[in-house]
Image (spheres, rainbow, N blue to C red):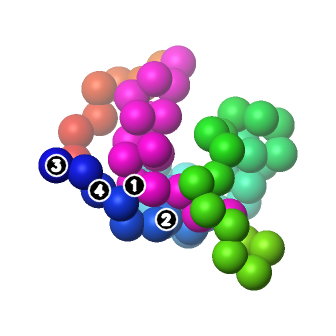
């Protein structure tokens, strides 16, 4: 099943349990995938994009939701 919901910095932060500013920093330093969509200058990612990114991150502890 594909999850095409769009996630903001806030949604990603909640998913990985950090502050939204941390996610912004990840993007600034090239650690976050490119946004799937940009609306009014704000980046958004598909939930599946972020889940795949989380699974491939170094130090991932096989997080399951």
Mark 3 vs 2: CB contact within 8 A: no
Q: Which residues are magenta?
A: 43-58
Name the residue beneath numbered marker 4.
3
Tell me, for residue 20, which label it has, or none: none
- Front residue of 9 and 17: 9
Name the residue beneath numbered marker 1.
47
Name the residue beneath numbered marker 3.
1
Query: Is 45 colored magenta in this rendering?
Result: yes
Say if 52 sits above or below 44 in the image: above
Say if 21 sits above or below 25 in the image: below
x and y, in percent, of residue 49 in the image: 45, 44
Mark 4 vs 3: CB contact within 8 A: yes
Residue at 46 percent across and 66 percent down: it is 6
Element type where label 4 sits in the image:
loop
Tell me, for residue 7, which label it has, or none: 2
x and y, in percent, of residue 55 in the image: 39, 28
Element type where label 1 sits in the image:
helix
Element type where label 3 sits in the image:
loop
Q: Earlier in the sequence, mark 3 or mark 2?
A: 3
Mark 2 vs 4: CB contact within 8 A: no
């Amino acid at each position: 099943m594909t999850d095409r919901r769009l996630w903001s910095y806030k949604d990603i932060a909640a998913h990985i349990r950090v502050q939204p500013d941390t996610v912004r920093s990840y993007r600034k330093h090239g650690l976050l995938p490119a946004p799937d969509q940009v609306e009014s200058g704000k980046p958004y990612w598909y939930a599946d994009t972020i889940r795949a990114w989380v699974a491939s991150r170094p130090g991932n502890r096989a997080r399951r939701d």
